[in-house]
Amino acid sequence: MHLRLSPCIGMPVVEEGTEDFLGSLSGVLIDPDVGRIEGMYVQIPGFFSQRELFCASQDILRFGTRVTVRSADAVCPQEEFIRLESLFRDPRTVLGQRIRTESGSYIGRCSDIQFETGGMRLEWIFPRRSFRWGLALPVSDIIEVKTDAIVVRDSAALEKEIEAEPAADEQTSVQSVPETA
């Protein structure tokens, strides 16, 4: 199944079998080198404060109207995931990161992603500039994820922008034709 992340934020996380509420989905951890979602952050509500725990992607069983995980023990502090320690400290992010082309043209910020739930692979990134959404970019167009920006191929990003702009110009440039009697 292919999902965008933004509608999933706030989705309840439940334990398989008992369907006990464990928390709400609050974010994802993406490996910027391979484009794989390594796990998800789960926000645990508290009386005066909230905690954010982590669940590895191999413990996530299903996505639907809720996220089903193997067991309540799978949702734990991120310090317990020693294999992912270097990834937790990696300053390169995907969400919220600037997107620019090889030549340096600014496209926008990555405001959303689409991923495939079977293999937990990133498929598309969705740039946003101010209040306007840009055209979605496939992960295959990403050259490199740096600490300051996601670098995408020039041709793919520019061709999509050029194709979209004339259509917008045609809609706004309506000529007035004088009426004849």
Image: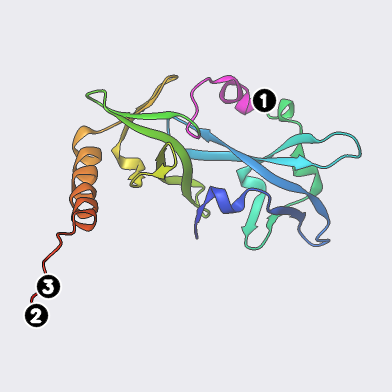
- Distance (Cα) linking label 2 and label 1: 81 Å
Q: Is residue 132 left or right of residue 7?
A: left
Q: Residue furthest right?
A: 47
Is 78 located above or below residue 172 in the figure? above
Which residue is denoted by mark 2 in the rendering?
181
Give the left or right position of residue 27, taking residue 45 as reference: left
Which quadrant would the C terminus be assigned to in this image? Answer: bottom left
Give the numbered dot on residue 82: 1
89 drawn magenta: yes
The type of residue carrying mark 1 is: Ile
Q: CA distance from mark 1 to mark 3?
A: 75 Å
Above or below, 173 against 84 in this view is below
Foreground mark, 2 or 1, reads: 2
Q: Amino acid at mark 2?
A: Ala
Q: Position of residue 76 (x, y in %)?
A: 77, 36
Q: Secondary structure at mark 1?
A: helix
Q: Secondary structure at mark 3?
A: loop
Stretch of the chain drawn in magenta: 83-95
Q: Are marks 3 and 2 in contact (CB under 8 Å)?
A: yes
Label 2 neighbour load within 10 Å: few <14, some 14-19, many 20+:
few
* Residue 134: numbered disc: none
Give the x, y percent position of residue 97.
46, 29
First of labels 1, 3 by sequence position: 1
SS at circle 2: loop
The residue nearer to you, when weighing 10 against 18, is: 10
Residue occupied by mark 3: 179
**Which residue lies most toward the bottom here?**
181
The answer to which image quadrant residue 56 occupies is top right
